[in-house]
Amino acid sequence: MRIEKNVELLPTIKTAGVILRPSSPELKKTFNEIKKLFEDSNIEILLENNSANMIGLEGHSLEGLCKKVDFLISVGGDGTLLSVVRKSFKYDKPVLGINLGTLGFLTDISMEQLPKFIEDLKNNIYKIDNRMMVEGSVNLNKFVAFNDIVISRKSISSMIKIKGKIDGKSFNTYYGDGVIISTPTGSTAYNLSVGGPIVYPLTEAFIVTPVAPHSLTQRPLVMPADFEIEFKIMDNQGAVVIVDGQDIYEIEQNQSIKIKIANKKAKMLHRIQRNYFEVLNEKLRWGN
């Protein structure tokens, strides 16, 4: 079976929850347009609390919202979508991304495309992508990542030494600016900008890419996702761990970060017409 084959549909399409890009009160007009389009098709729209407060409306807690809706709608750019996917992950709700940003690599629906998408949605003409997520732990802090986990030096004036293990066995020592541990979805983000490989987003794999390594022999590594990876900080300066570019944790010398595949996947709601390689061509000028 090809991994992109559409085998999953929403059980019901009656209610959707909306999360707006933070600090963007100008989105009130856009929200009202979205609300009208969905409610004209008999799909009730509920608004998340922080978004509601931002535009002067009544809202619901994220937990309450996720318990009431059939799917979620992220309105903004890829950063908003990353946040929504991570915060709602445990509720197992598909997320639709409406793109109001610049790149729009993950958020593939524009406001112009939305009326046709809603029509297709009602006719079960859409697809749900199941994307690999990773779980990480630093000391007592546990988190999930959709794109990547970055281990970076604290000081710009010195490099960092990181010892890597796979299932408890040493596999490499990195010396440079840091290491990126990316999901296939995140392979086109920071990983790509430092020379890492593009990996098809429905694949299950870790991509481990050194950042500015102090060795010509250090190269990106793609490995099956059923390993547990551990990175130990060897320098007295410690390090910072950055999750999806949004959450930051400090880690000290001789402490470790452990990373493994999450026990379930993130669900992304897409147009049936979406083609990953066309997105690469459009957004990244793939092949040009």
Image: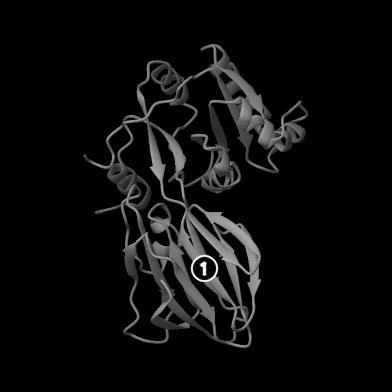
> Horizontally, is 266 left or right of 1 in the view?
right
* Horizontal side, residue 92 vs residue 275: left or right: right
Quarter of the image with the C terminus in it: bottom left
Q: Nearer the viewer, residue 272 or 138?
A: 138
Q: Nearer the viewer, residue 67 or 81?
A: 67
* SS label for mark 1: strand
**Count of marks placed on residues:** 1
Residue that appears at 32% across and 66% down: 222
Residue 242 located left or right of residue 193: right
Give residue 253's position: percent from left, percent from top. 61, 83
Residue at (53, 26) in percent of width and height: 70
Name the quadrant containing residue 235: bottom right
Q: Residue type at mark 1: give it.
A: Lys
Screen quadrant of the N terminus: top left
Residue wearing tag 1 = 258
The location of residue 72, given as percent across then percent down, is 55, 32
Q: Position of residue 184 (x, y in %)?
A: 37, 55
Q: Crowding at label 1, few (<14), some or many (≥20) Cα neighbours within 10 Å?
A: some
Q: Position of residue 209 (x, y in %)?
A: 40, 70
Q: Is residue 226 above or below residue 53?
A: below
Residue at the spot 39% in from the left edge and 19% down from the top edge: 120
Give the camera-side residue of 6 and 41. 6
Determine the residue positioned at 56% across, 36% down.
74
Q: Quadrant of residue 100?
A: top right
Residue found at the far left of this picture: 1
Color scheme of the displayed model: one colour
